[in-house]
Structure formats: structure tokens, C-alpha cells
Amino acid sequence: MEWRDEGIILGTRKHGETSAILEVMTRAHGRHLGLVRGGRSRKQQPVLQPGNRVDLLWRARLDEHLGTFQAEPIEMNAARLMDSAVAVYGLQTMAAHLRLLPERDAHEGLYETLAVMIVHLDDADVAGELVARFELLVLDELGFGLDLSQCAATGTRQDLAYVSPKSGRAVSREAGLPWRDKMLALPAFLQRGSGLRADAADVDDAFRLTGFFFTRHVYEPRGIEPPDARTGFLAALRKHHARGKAIAGEDAAREIIT
């Protein structure tokens, strides 16, 4: 058995004295594991880092075997990403979400999205928006997608402000007003084609929304806990937003003084 594909490294773990088991998200073969002989060598270690995009050759005697990988670098992103706590936790969070999907099931849309996100993941001003959208995509791939296109009650596509916790469908501000305390907030930036950017409050609302449906449909039924990396990612984002707010306040005070 043999195939060649490109993939993004999600993680590695030691195997024996010199080898490593590599976990990658591939374009055509989904999330896949394989043994890299000599993967802990000085030459291989910089290549086999999370976030790097690699060209892969997989071989095994039988399809169900672990098999071996040969990995050659295409895009070395790891060093850049490791300089940002937001990027490190963000990549770990997305890797944890991908592990919810069956191994070796192709999800080309998720692969393409992951590849685009890695380019921008170290920009903390947009990372929150990107990972929230990725979580919506994973929910959809798991069969629990949210319908944020129109109001469940009236059919309107305007002024969508809430999501029903029961149906996972959007609700307009007017229709949802009587039940607003029981609804989940729908940040405007999550609506398709909005072109809007998110502030810190919008990002918090987005992760509260996706977190609710992950807990209901995935974590509780499987008896698992949310990934620690997601908590770390949100903490790193809040720290970044707080720092930005403090800097803005200092700049404003400086303008007043001068």
C-alpha cells in the first residue's frame, strides 16, 4: 500500500529510541498517523513540528497498518507560530477538534481551511474570528451544523441576533426578543457575507455559542472534557485584548496631555 499527499502536522510523539509517530491532517486522506524512522534526529526534528506543511509518502503492507511516513518540508511555519501563545493554543485547539473526526476520513474543506488559517494564526487580532469559524465548520462536518442563514421564526435574513439553543437555528432580534434571556447571542461577524470584524465581546459570544453545541452534541455524549488548549487559547486572546485596550488608553491619555 502506498500513497503521496500533502499534509499539515498536528503533533508527534516519541517511538522507541530514534523514531516518532507523526500525526497529520492531509488533503485527501484525512487525519492520518504514521511512523517516521529517525524522526527524532537533528535533521528531522525541525521538519516534524506542528503547523509545518509537508509532502508525505506513506507506505504499509496492509491498508489497516500504521505504516511509515517520509516527510519533506513544503512550508516551515512552526518557528513563526511558536512565538505567539495565541497561535500555539489555536493550533492545538484545532488539532483537538480534528481528532473528534474518524481517522483517515477525507475532509478536504477542513484541510484547506486549516492551511489558510495557519498563515494568519499568529495575528491575534484575527485569530479568534478564524478559530470560531473553524469550530462551526467542524460542527458541520460532525453532523451538528448550525443554520445561521435566516430566522427560524420569520424566514428573514435581516438583523439576526440570536441562536436557538434547541434547534441551532438563527432568530431575528424582533422575533427572539421575548425569549432573549434563553437565547444564545449570534455575533454579526459569523453571518455569511457580513464582512464585519469582531471585537472582544463578539469573540467571547462566538465561543460561547460553539462551546454550547460542542458540549451538547459531542463532549457530553462521548463522556469527554473540552480540550485544555481551548481554555488556553481563550485566555491568551483575552490577555491580548486587555493589553491592546491598555495601550489604547495610554495613547489617548498621551494625546490629552500633549
Image: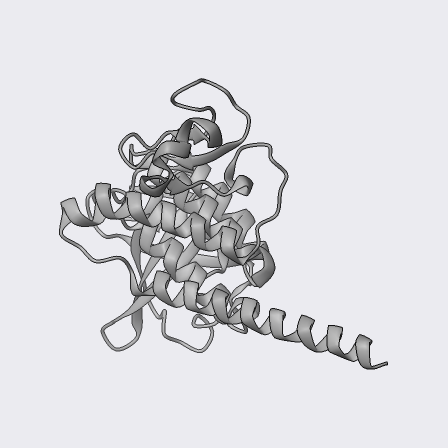
> Quick one: 245 or 221, which is closer to the camera?
245
Q: Look at the image and name its color scheme.
A: one colour
Question: In this image, 204 relative to 210: left or right?
Answer: right
Outermost residue on the front side: it is 178
Outermost residue on the bottom side: it is 257
Q: Quadrant of the N terminus?
A: top left
The residue at the point 42 percent across, 58 percent down is 9
How many marks the image carries: the answer is 0
> Quick one: 18 or 213, which is closer to the camera?
213
**Residue 208 on image: x %, y %:** 37, 51
**Residue 179 on image: x %, y %:** 34, 35
Q: Is residue 80 above or below residue 138?
A: below
Q: Is residue 190 above or below residue 120?
A: above
The residue at the point 37 percent across, 32 percent down is 178
The residue at the point 52 percent across, 23 percent down is 157
> Quick one: 161 or 242, which is closer to the camera?
161
Q: Quadrant of the C terminus?
A: bottom right
The residue at the point 25 percent across, 42 percent down is 102
Outermost residue on the top side: it is 155
**Residue 227 on image: x %, y %:** 29, 60
Question: In this image, 6 relative to 104: left or right?
Answer: right
* Residue 6 seen in this snapshot: no
Q: Is residue 150 above or below residue 74?
A: above
> Quick one: 238 or 138, which is closer to the camera?
238
**Residue 215 on image: x %, y %:** 24, 48
* Residue 107 seen in this snapshot: yes
